[in-house]
Amino acid sequence: MPHRLTLTEMAAQIRSKKLSPVELLDAHLLQIQKHNPKINAFIRILHDESRAAARASEQAQMRDEFAGPLHGVPVTIKDSFDMAGYPTTCGSSFFQDLRATRDAAAVRRFKQAGAIPFAKTNCPEFLANYESDNNLIGRTNNPWNLDRTAGGSSGGESAAIASFFSPAGIGSDGGGSVRVPAHFCGIAGLKPTPGRVSAVGHMPAINHPGGLLGVAGPMARTAKDVKLLFETLSGYDWEDPFSVPVPLRPPDLSGVRIGCMEQFLNVPVEAGVRAAVRKAAQCAQDLGFPVESFQPKGMERAPNLWWFFFGILPARITNAFIAGREDRAHWTGTEFLTKALQEAEPTANKVLESLAARDKMRTAMLSQMEQFPVLLLPACGVCAFEHRQRRYETDQKPIGLFEAMMPSTPFNLFGLPGMVIPFGIDERGLPAGVQLVGRPYEEELLLELAIKLEEARGPFPAPPGYAS
């Protein structure tokens, strides 16, 4: 069952000629044929094109010619990244006939590394929801429980990887959209510092001001695989206004102190979420890392400020775009839009004041992280919820969706990297991840720590019923 290997193992076996790229692709396509009808992870599967690419990779393999570290390995692409010749739908029928003229930077770098992008994965309309559902193909279900969401906006990607339809891929994260689906589906995902992984060719464009929040980020089943993806995808890109020439650097874990947050300030979380964080904290301590309780000061309004930039500021533009065509819009694209339009239209003064407040708050956060360069906390306050559920019980009080996402959204606001790895199973049989947050451009440290924590944790189970 080659599709059950990790990304790293697949790449190694292809290079040693123990595994054929054609055999590997066919194994994934067979897994999709067997299980995807109940998951619904894909907007498009490139059967003929990917088979041709796999045959070419196999021929090069036989000649001992390897394009790069991912030679012959199939990967998937969230359908908000351009692939030349195909529509980038962003989960919307408004874009289903608009074909990209060139590959996004992430797709291009995948190909340069020898990978075979073979499918585009589902997302909510306009990427504007925490559930991946739209008018094009419908909703994506969570492989751990079909009655629950795989998350959003990179929900198709997370479900595909968790179900062994794909070993890895690329998602994007403006408010938890890589980290939350990874947590919901029991996989690993990285939200890098803005510009560390080029987002050129993403729709909507990740430029100012949205690029303060949004990034392109790799997703896979293990932290070791995410590290390989990050090393493949990172690098300077002059077309990305946030890109900086930061080279890959060996991490130094000596003396690293971890600040542990079992929840965001006074907002409660589900018991399974809290248990996963405590388990990860104990593993970190057993590995020799000092772990201390951490409560950031001055961050109370951070989620609201994130909502201003993510929801309120672009709302009028989105509303004008769909004006007169509201009957074609999907609920995932309008649920948060409707809420945002109830707020006063932002003035220039409000935008400038909010930018200044964001910068001041970010400085305060980084000052506090001088003592704790890594934070350990939940990715989300709840595990995968039922489709369209918006209130959740905790042992203290019910919380809503906005509160549930508070462990993730402030770090989009501050532009800090965040890494999610699975660390527990709750009483309902749902995976619970933990999040490691670091300082800007310190992804290597987060990845190395995540690898060590996964090794201490041991193998993480697959969703029941997807073993073959």
Image (cartoon, grey):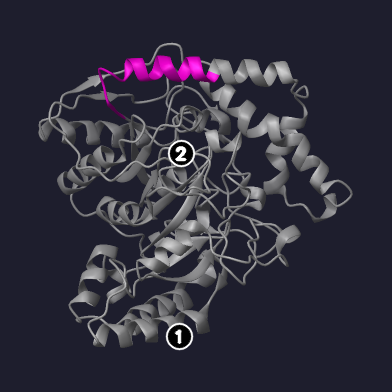
User: Which residue position is annotated with label 2?
Assistant: 194
Q: Which residue carries the number 1 mark? A: 52
Q: Tell me: residue 428, above or below residue 117.
A: above
Which quarter of the rendering shows the C terminus? bottom left
Q: Position of residue 287 (x, y in %)?
A: 11, 35
Disc 2, SS: loop
Residue 415, magenta (yes or no): no
User: How far across and down, in percent of the image, does residue 11 sit?
Assistant: 26, 69
What is the quadrant of residue 341 in the picture?
Answer: top right
Queried whether the magenta region covers residue 362, the answer comes back as yes
In space, the residues marked 1 and 2 are separated at their CA atoms by 35 Å
Q: Which mark is residue 282?
A: none
Q: Point out residue 146 in the picture as x, y percentages from the top left corner.
A: 50, 58
Q: Amino acid at mark 2?
A: Pro
* In the displayed structure image, the side of residue 337 where residue 234 appears, left or right: left
Between disc 1 and disc 2, whose residue precedes?
1
What residue is shown at x 30% (from left), y 84% (from top)? 60
